Amino acid sequence: MNLRWRSKLLGLVALSFFVSPAWATASQSPQWLLMTSFWTKHFDPKPEHNNHQDMINLEYQTAPSEAPFDWLPAQPDIRYLAGAATFRNSFAQRSEYAYVGVTQRWWGSDQWDIYGKLTMGLLHGYRGEYKDKIPLNGWGTAPAVLPGVGASWGPVSTEVILFGSAGIMWTGGVRF
């Protein structure tokens, strides 16, 4: 386990002590999620691939059963979300991802949840010789769809996210 990974995990655990007293009453409320990346694996690794994304992600999630628009269904196990992330892409270029999406709770209790997640949005930051490494990046910004699965316990969350056919990332964060 490298030092970068351990320091991020220790920081999240420390932060969870500050937000945990409010968690018991906030689990059915709208919430924010602050996440970082712990580990990345490319399915077809190349020597130039960066596996340290230094990702920071901030996401807003609606309360369960709350739909942001009348035309969206409100269901007890669904949270709608919107967020933005900044990270270093596979070629160490600073990149951004702005997105909307949904989580669906699969199992859980008052203290923990297992859920599926799907986000879709715009990905910006693949430039120069790496511009064509993602599809539809004609103007430097491309559409992206990222599926994932996650687990949360109290205010602490972790997710495993597929980024296209390129790889997989493990993230963690806190809800507040």
Image (cartoon, rainbow, N blue to C red):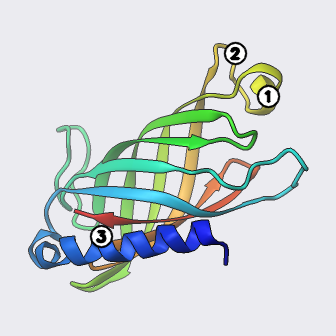
Q: Earlier in the sequence, mark 2 or mark 1?
A: 1
Rendered view: 110 above or below 41:
below
Q: Which amino acid type is marked by label 1?
A: Tyr
Distance from label 2 to label 3 (Cα)?
Answer: 40 Å
> Alpha-carbon neighbours of circle 2 within 10 Å: few (<14), some, or many (≥20)?
few
Q: Which amino acid type is marked by label 3?
A: Leu
Residue that carries the numbered disc 2 in the rendered image: 138
The residue lying at 50 percent from left, 37 percent from top is 97
Residue that carries the numbered disc 3 in the rendered image: 15
Q: Which amino acid type is marked by label 2?
A: Gly
Label 3 close to label 1 by CB (< 8 Å): no
SS for dot 3:
helix
Q: Which residue ends up furthest to the right in the rendered image?
A: 47
Label 2 close to label 1 by CB (< 8 Å): no
The residue lying at 32 percent from left, 57 percent from top is 33
In x, y percent, where is residue 84? Answer: 41, 40
Residue that carries the numbered disc 1 in the rendered image: 130
> Alpha-carbon neighbours of circle 3 within 10 Å: few (<14), some, or many (≥20)?
some
The residue lying at 38 percent from left, 59 percent from top is 103
Q: Nearer the viewer, mark 3 or mark 1?
A: 3
